[in-house]
Image (cartoon, rainbow, N blue to C red):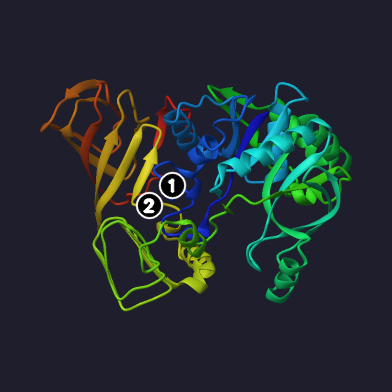
């Protein structure tokens, strides 16, 4: 069995923590591990697992690789999607990448929470047996309330064990219909998790959407392999139809079965859902960071950098980050995505970027910005190297505050240590790298007429960036 980790979501409803270039699956929302890491770690104890295949946005490739490395996982492949095409093409790519058509794929979104490991493992073991018989298995979460935010799966006759044939996949219902689904006992929440043989899925996909499978084959054949990364051909993959597994295959096949899953599942799709699965104080508050409360109940309060004081409220969500504060009633947190839409319309960076931006070589924190100048704190990992580059509109002044920097400046190479500095004039080809064994920290002061990140002309990059 091969775990297939799908990491394509942007998590807009968890803004301002989750952002386009650092979405929720890469964040430690519940434990000290990120959600991607938890997705892998909760499989510990299952027998017969092969190395996982991860599918993610090309922009997230280094975060995916680093987070897997942090928990000691060597993936079989990290498939990079140049454009998002929903889950069916992503799973098709994983199935085509599997070593054998008899390999069973355990398809898991990277941003779920599951509390009961024993129940989860039991369902996976049963799914593995059914998948080996040629069934396409989905996991239907036993509903605990009339939820209108999830799609549903209606069960049919009992197939074998605890598994039922699938009667229908149902769109998100209104409140009255959701109550009916809950009372009938015939409906489950659609978890988006699956298990099937690679060959079984590809056979059904070819039957129902041969164009999608053909384009996936071509894009994979033309892909470039770079370390663990499989870079799909953008021109070919862009022409692939976009569709979910449900629409492309599961709703149309006669081989679909559903296993009821009662394991404390949540897709953590909103701040209220995160409040549900987070430990709370005696007053029902889920608190993270430097927070003081007075007469506050049933609220979610997250402080990332500053002291947050909350007085006399209930059922409120308060989230503070280094560059944004979001406040909303718990019953209106689904509307957070509308804020993200507004930010994009206004072309504001806060929609996609945190003040701290992660790169394959480390990260930088934009600590000050003004007219014609900005200041960054840059941290370069040991062995990390920024691209060889130049800028048309800005000059840079670097001051080393920790570690040792190897600086390329035109034809000159300089070794700069703590409390030393250098100046990079506008238009000069330059590079910064860390030759040491401890992180390199520098303060960079930029000055010029334009300071955007797109004013970078790269001449060479050890991470394969354009």
Q: Which circle's residue, 1 or 2, is located before the other in the chain?
A: 1
**Within the image, what quadrant is residue 156 found in?**
bottom right
Residue drawn at (52%, 24%), measured in percent from left and top? 74
Please tell me whether mark 2 sits on a helix, a strand or a loop: loop
As drawn, the label of residue 278 is: none
Q: Position of residue 352 (x, y in %)?
A: 45, 53
Say which quarter of the image contains residue 463.
top left
Please report the residue visible at 48 percent of the width from the left and 58 percent of the height from the top. Answer: 274
Give the residue at mark 2: 354
Q: Residue at x 45, y 65 (%)?
A: 346
Q: Is residue 390 visible?
A: no
Q: Residues within 10 Å of mark 1 (few under 14, many from 20)?
A: some
Count up the numbered dots.
Answer: 2
Observer-side mark, 1 or 2, equals 1
Picture layout, residue 216 above or below residue 448: above
Viewer-side residue, 460 vs 31? 31
Image spot of residue 226 (x, y percent): 55, 23
Q: Are marks 1 and 2 in contact (CB under 8 Å)?
A: no
Q: Quadrant of the N terminus?
A: top right
Q: Does residue 85 appear to the left or right of 418 in the view shown?
A: right
- Vertical arrangement, residue 324 with respect to residue 222, above or below: below
Distance CA(mark 1)–CA(mark 2): 12 Å
Neighbor class of circle 2 (other Cα within 10 Å; few <14, some 14-19, many 20+) is many
Give the SS element for disc 1: loop
- x and y percent of residue 49 in the render? 63, 26
Q: What residue do we see at 79% from left, 30% from top?
A: 132
User: Percent from the top left, x then y, of residue 424?
Assistant: 23, 35
Please give the residue where the numbered disc 1 appears in the rendered image.
Answer: 27
């Amino acid at each position: 069995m091969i775990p297939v980790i799908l990491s394509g979501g942007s998590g807009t409803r968890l803004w301002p923590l989750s952002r386009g270039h650092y979405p929720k699956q890469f964040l430690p929302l519940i434990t000290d591990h990120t959600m991607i890491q938890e997705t892998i770690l909760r499989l510990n104890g299952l027998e017969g697992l092969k190395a996982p295949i991860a599918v993610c946005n090309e922009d997230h490739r280094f975060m995916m690789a680093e987070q897997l490395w942090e928990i000691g996982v060597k993936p079989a492949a990290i498939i990079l999607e140049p454009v998002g095409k929903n889950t069916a093409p992503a799973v098709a790519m994983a199935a085509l990448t599997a070593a054998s058509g008899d390999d069973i794929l355990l398809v898991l979104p990277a941003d779920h929470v599951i509390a009961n490991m024993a129940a989860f493992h039991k369902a996976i073991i049963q799914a593995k047996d059914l998948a080996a018989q040629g069934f396409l298995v989905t996991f239907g979460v036993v509903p605990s309330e009339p939820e209108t935010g999830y799609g549903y799966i209606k069960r049919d006759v009992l197939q074998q064990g605890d598994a039922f044939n699938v009667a229908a996949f149902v769109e998100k219902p209104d409140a009255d219909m959701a109550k009916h689904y809950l009372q009938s006992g015939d409906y489950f929440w659609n978890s988006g998790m699956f298990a099937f043989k690679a060959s079984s899925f590809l056979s059904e996909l070819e039957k129902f959407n041969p164009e999608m499978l053909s384009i996936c084959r071509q894009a994979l054949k033309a892909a470039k392999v770079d370390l663990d990364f499989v870079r799909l051909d953008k021109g070919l993959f862009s022409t692939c139809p976009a569709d979910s597994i449900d629409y492309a295959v599961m709703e149309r096949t006669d081989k679909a079965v559903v296993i009821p899953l009662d394991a404390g599942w949540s897709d953590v799709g909103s701040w209220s859902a995160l409040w549900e699965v987070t430990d709370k104080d005696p007053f029902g508050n889920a608190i993270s960071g430097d927070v003081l409360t007075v007469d506050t109940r049933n609220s979610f309060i997250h402080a990332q950098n500053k002291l947050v004081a909350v007085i006399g409220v209930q059922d409120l969500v308060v989230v503070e980050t280094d560059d944004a504060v979001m406040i909303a009633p718990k019953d209106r947190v689904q509307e957070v995505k509308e804020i993200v839409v507004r930010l994009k319309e206004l072309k504001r960076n806060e929609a996609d970027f945190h003040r701290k931006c992660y790169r394959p070589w480390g990260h930088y924190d934009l600590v000050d910005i003004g007219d014609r100048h900005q200041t960054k704190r840059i941290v370069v990992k040991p062995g990390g190297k920024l691209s060889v580059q130049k800028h048309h509109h800005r000059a840079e002044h670097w001051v080393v505050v920790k570690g040792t920097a190897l600086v390329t400046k035109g034809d000159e190479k300089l070794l700069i240590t703590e409390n030393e500095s250098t100046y990079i004039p506008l238009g000069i080809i330059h590079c910064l790298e860390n030759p040491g064994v401890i992180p390199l920290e520098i303060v960079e002061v930029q000055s010029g007429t334009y300071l955007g990140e797109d004013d970078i002309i790269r001449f060479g990059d050890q991470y394969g960036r354009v």
